[in-house]
Image: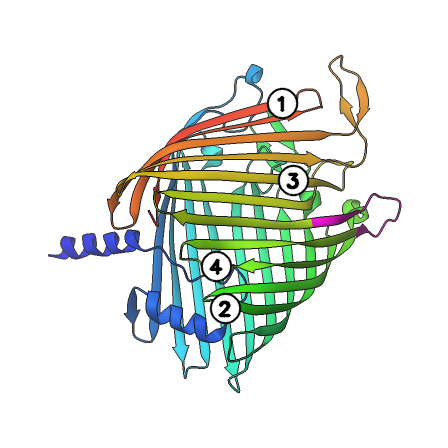
Amino acid sequence: MKMKRIAVFLLSFILVSSGLVYGQGHQPFESLWQSVLNQSVWRVGPFYLVPRIKLNNIGYDANVYREREEDDPVTDYTATFSPEVTAYLLAGHSLILSFRENPEYVYYMNTERERRWNHVFSPEVKWQLFNRFVLGGKYNYSNRRHRFSTEVDYRVNVQIKQYEGSLFYETARRTSLGVKYSHENLTYQDVDVPGAEFPWFQRLSRNEEGISGEFYYQVLSDSYFFIKGGYTSYRFLDEDAAWRDSDSRQVYAGLQFPLLGRMRGTLSLGYKSFKPLDEELADFSGLAGNADMEYRMRRLRFRAGYTRDNRFSYWSESLFYIENQIKAGVSFYISSSLRLDYDYSYGNNDYLEDSWWLGPEGDVILIQRNDIYNTHTAGVAVRILRDIGIALNINYWERKTNIYYGDRNWWFVGGSLVYDF
């Protein structure tokens, strides 16, 4: 009997896919309250629990460190196990407390250096005052080893501590107007892999501080038009990286769709002005934003995405690069239990300033670097129970660049659990 109860508990844990996340953007207090009541799986005393478990990237990694083919890349078998629990406490129809705990274990069979416990912890509070004002506060702690940008070939230890406060005014039509403040500390650890050491990532450690104004207007059920504008300062912790200190101003507008439904995702486009404090360095101004959309139509599910922004570079002579990325994908349901998937993304990292690189003859030459990325993912997914399925995929990634020895490719064959089949 005891083993049966344990099995039922684990199965329930696996079957849950939570739609209760704050990260998508501001969600009206009443809408969030109802979501907690409707989508929580268990109630233990005053707490509403939303569990989830992920099993990802179970398979064969053909290039663990994304090395050149002629350098005999390290290969290995890997898997990622990630349980997550979010607990909500509702009080007096005016207070929502949440606590998110998400440990994650990344396993490699032979590459011990890449075995790692990652950890994310995030408490948050929403307090409604006079039925119109909503005070918010959030702390987020993240300690993970991962490839934090398209520029990075190696998994890097990154620790993030973030504090956030907000005040919103909400109308009866769920229109919201508010202000948000955030302070974020990012600490990067240099990489030490077999045969090489890369003492460059620590120079990216910094504090980011920002304030923004936000407006949300409900256009459809659980869908919102929004405008956000704000200011962000970037101050680097290493004295040798102080030349990287910068400021940015940005304004975005877009649509925020529900997390569940036929149409979902977020479309956000706008204008960004990024200026280093050192006026002799190149700046960035122009179109910026991101989009990640999905639409379901009978047997077909379409996906599309777009990203354009400037990112800090870890290379010693480059302050930043401009990242452009477009994504498209489609899923075809052969039956209610069998699905075919394909996704493609194209990316371009453009460096505005010339820098010195090693040439093919061993000399050092001045080049304006430009990288192009292509990623293909094809697979099949099989439903096993309700909206849960098992997906088997082949992933291929390549980078083409105009610097010598910079071309890379990587492929992975494996599977994972998928939700919302």
Scheme by which the image is coloured: rainbow
Which residue is disc 1 drawn over? 407
Q: Nearer the viewer, mark 1 or mark 3?
A: 3
- 267 or 125: which is nearer to us? 267
- 166 or 342: which is nearer to us? 342
3D distance between C-alphas at marks 1 and 4: 37 Å
Q: Quadrant of residue 106?
A: top left
Amino acid type at image mark 1: Asp
3D distance between C-alphas at marks 2 and 1: 43 Å
Numbered mark located on residue 324 in the image: 3
Q: Position of residue 130 (x, y in %)?
A: 53, 87
Left or right: 379, with 318 as reference point:
left
Q: Position of residue 314 (x, y in %)?
A: 69, 39
Which residue is disc 2 drawn over? 124
Query: Which numbered disc, 2 or 3, marks the residue that appears first in the sequence?
Result: 2
The N terminus sits in image quarter: bottom left
| Residue 74 sits inside the magenta stretch | no
Left or right: 356, with 88 as reference point:
right
Which residue is disc 4 drawn over? 121
SS of the residue under disc 3: strand
